[in-house]
Image (spheres, helix red, strand yellow):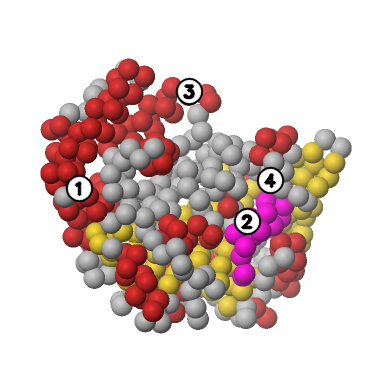
Amino acid sequence: MANCAIVGINWGDEGKGRMVDLLTQDHDVVVRYQGGGNAGHTVINEKGKFALHLLPSGIFRDGVVNILGNGVALDPENLWQEICQVRGQGVRLTPENLKISDRASLLLPWHRDLDELEERRLGDKKFGSTKQGIAPFYSDKYQKKTVLAGELFYPAHLKAHLLDLMEWKNLTLTRVYGAEAYTEAKLDAWLESACEKIRPFVCDTGAFLRQAQEAGKKILFEAQLGSLRDLDFGIHPYTTSSNTTAAYAPIGSGFPGAKIDRVLGVVKAYSTCVGEGPFVSELFGEEGDRLREAGGEYGAKTGRPRRVGAMDLVATAYGVQVQAATELALTKLDVLSGMEKIPVCHAYQLGDEVSTTFPFPTALPAARPVIDHMPGWQEDLSNIRRWEDLPQAARDYVNRIEQAVGCPIRYISVGPERERIIVKY
Ligand code: GDP
């Protein structure tokens, strides 16, 4: 099996982590290429249950090298905490199996403050940020107002660079938001408590990836969030601040020449969405509450209840197209067991028009879901391992999704544990 990108087709939280954990058995290197520690990937395997935020989901397999590429928002404090936590759960993490790109930009301490201050300023108009500093970080990255991880090897230069940035950022903090200014002492503490700790992991990961490819190693690219949160193709402005698409993987991983042979899109068997913004197939009241409880739909990072909705074929077909997915994994099908009938949103009503085309973001809040219902099933699916053994109603549901979105569903997951999976072909 060749290089593969595992990406989200919807709004994130589709279960990408469990698919990366599964597919690492066929790969040698796993790379996170965008985003930060603002979302969580949940992985359950023989080593325990883990909520990963920035670490690639391949860290549990012996012999797999994990890389944080130049495209990620590298928060040294949070990353170090996560490393300590995962090590505390018995996972081996060394510079041999975890490598950080020297070209990754550092999320600086004030980025989180700025996120918080801006959400507070927005009040009712807030975007529902996770307040991890991701948007301020990416803005500064593109303004070239942050530092690269590789600068940790040049302490005198680094200190002068950071002091320059601090002087500039203090203007915004104090004059725009009336917040406290940063001091050199605070920066020194951050350098010592977090940056020094992660420095041993920093190296030229681009060179490592090129050599790995030449040696015939197989690379897995792991994305965060999903198509609809992509900075360029998502539901602007309720997107994240990076590209969640597979096409960005070669750039964000530090290996621009990478060839991606498979794009595995992960789709949840129903819809969920965290934070603000239009969510056309949203279910409210008892129907929504029931699905939220059955699926345990609470944020891995924030604990926030996720908004839940019917399978949205319009958004999912668009997500598949944006990712150029070559195959799909449908997760959490087990959660739908016990429903008498299952709602499916197969079109949007916009004024007088009914359409299956995903609209321009500005038109999205006015879209109304066109929903029909499919027969449900009562059986518990969690011990089923073969497609033929699924109840007919479950197969009909999967087939309908496959047809509507125009991409084969290869995997169907029926539980969070590694082995609870049906491989269809
Ligand atoms: P990610 O960010 O895309 O990796 O998704 P999350 O980890 O945030 O959300 C997926 C959640 O669903 C996690 O709690 C998983 O353990 C869980 N999960 C994944 N696949 C399945 C499945 O097939 N069935 C059930 N019941 N839970 C699943």
C-alpha gap between disc 2 and disc 1: 37 Å
In the rendered image, the quadrant that contains the C terminus is bottom right
The amino acid type of the residue labelled 3 equals Gly
- Residue position marked by numbered label 2 in the rendering: 322
User: Any mark on residue 349, and which?
Assistant: none
| Viewer-side residue, 79 vs 157 | 157
**Depicted 286 relative to depicted 43: above or below:** above
Give the residue drawn at x 42%, y 38%: 139
Name the amino acid, label 1. Answer: Ala
Q: Secondary structure at mark 2?
A: helix
x and y percentages locating residue 246 in the rendered image: 53, 60
Specify the label residue 281 is tagged with: 4
- Tag 3 or tag 1, which sits nearer the N-term? 3
Residue that label 1 marks? 194
Q: Which comes before the other along the chain, label 2 or label 3?
A: 3
**Residue at image location 37% in from the left, 81% down from the top:** 215
Q: Nearer the viewer, residue 221 or 20?
A: 221
Q: Nearer the N terminus, badge 2 or badge 1? A: 1
Q: CA distance from mark 2 to mark 3?
A: 32 Å
Which residue matches tag 3?
A: 123
Q: Is mark 3 within 8 Å of ligand 1?
A: no
Labels 4 and 3: the sequence-earlier one: 3
Q: Crowding at label 3, few (<14), some or many (≥20) Cα neighbours within 10 Å?
A: few
In the image, what residue type sits under mark 2? Val
